[in-house]
Image (spheres, rainbow, N blue to C red):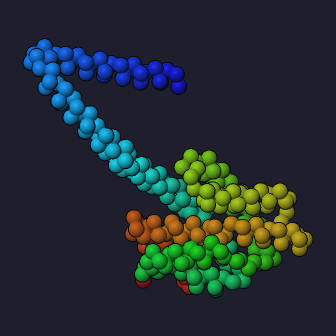
Amino acid sequence: MIKRYSFFMSLALIFLTLSVMLYFVHYLIFRDVHHIFIYMLGDLAFLPLEVLLVVLILERILARREKESKLQKLNMVVGAFFSEAGNHLLNSLLKEFDNRTEIALHLNITEKWTHKDFRKAEEFAYNLRIEVDCHSVNLEGLKAFLAGKRDFLLALLGNPNLLEHDRFTSLLWAITHLDEELEARPSVANLPEKDLAHLANDIRRFYDHLASEWLDYVEHLKTSYPYLFSLVLRTHPFQEHPSAILS
């Protein structure tokens, strides 16, 4: 910090000395102090406007571009998550929910959806009340799937682009917690009722976040990547007969 401060002070002194030298050369050539002070005062009068342009306008433009760049990188990370794990969890767990018909009714996105439709669906998803009985959930399959994605999920948690996205980070932690719960049990067969209820609560904890983050990501695809959005329209699990094949 001290070295950096010293560098700027030295740089300021150099520019100040250069300015004085140039004014002195101007005086030596034209011998007109009155002219020098007229233009010096004019430059000083324009200085606040220059500060206004640089600080309030250019800085905001640069900050906006930086924010857009971070958002683009974040969407790439979120896209990788859904391709690798999120889509599978959305699909496989939905089939086990007692209120899956109601969920599908609100989250069945179509090509005609507007920003208002996405916001309405996201509000429903974020406050979603999952009705799930772990007797019907394939816990062995879920345990194996999450174990296979453990390194991937931990790598995502270490991604610096997620530092400002608390909701998505919370989603990853909730999924990682369920993985740890399942891994801590030598067997998930014939678990007591209290244990099954605990695991069901862990599933509820992240699925609403998962659905709302998915809606955000899909709306981003609709705006920026229509060809990827087209694939999502055909394959998402909230429709009656999902299929990638065009008919």
Query: Viewed as shown, does residue 176 lie left or right of 197?
Result: left
Give the percent coordinates (x, y) of residue 152.
62, 52
Residue 134: which quarter of the image?
Answer: bottom right
Using the rendered image of the protein, determine whether residue 195 is visible from the camera's viewpoint: yes
Q: Nearer the viewer, residue 187 or 38?
A: 38
Give the percent coordinates (x, y) of residue 158.
62, 47
Q: Residue at x 55, y 62 (%)?
A: 83
Residue pushed farthest front? 34
Q: Residue at x 47, y 70 (%)?
A: 219
Q: Quadrant of the C terminus?
A: bottom left
- Tell how many labels: 0
Give the percent coordinates (x, y) of residue 146.
70, 60
Task: Say if 99 sits above or below 195 in the image.
Answer: below
Q: Nearer the viewer, residue 18 or 179?
A: 18
Give the percent coordinates (x, y) of residue 233.
47, 76
Q: Nearer the viewer, residue 149 or 81?
A: 81
Q: Residue at x 31, y 21 (%)?
A: 16
Query: Viewed as shown, does residue 173 lie left or right of 3?
Result: right
Residue 68: which quarter of the image?
Answer: bottom left
Q: Residue at x 20, y 20 (%)?
A: 23
Residue pushed farthest right? 192
Task: Say if 38 sits above or below 241 in the image.
Answer: above
Query: Viewed as shown, does residue 179 lie left or right of 28?
Result: right
Query: Viewed as shown, does residue 147 lie left or right of 169?
Result: right
Using the rendered image of the protein, determine whether residue 237 is visible from the camera's viewpoint: no
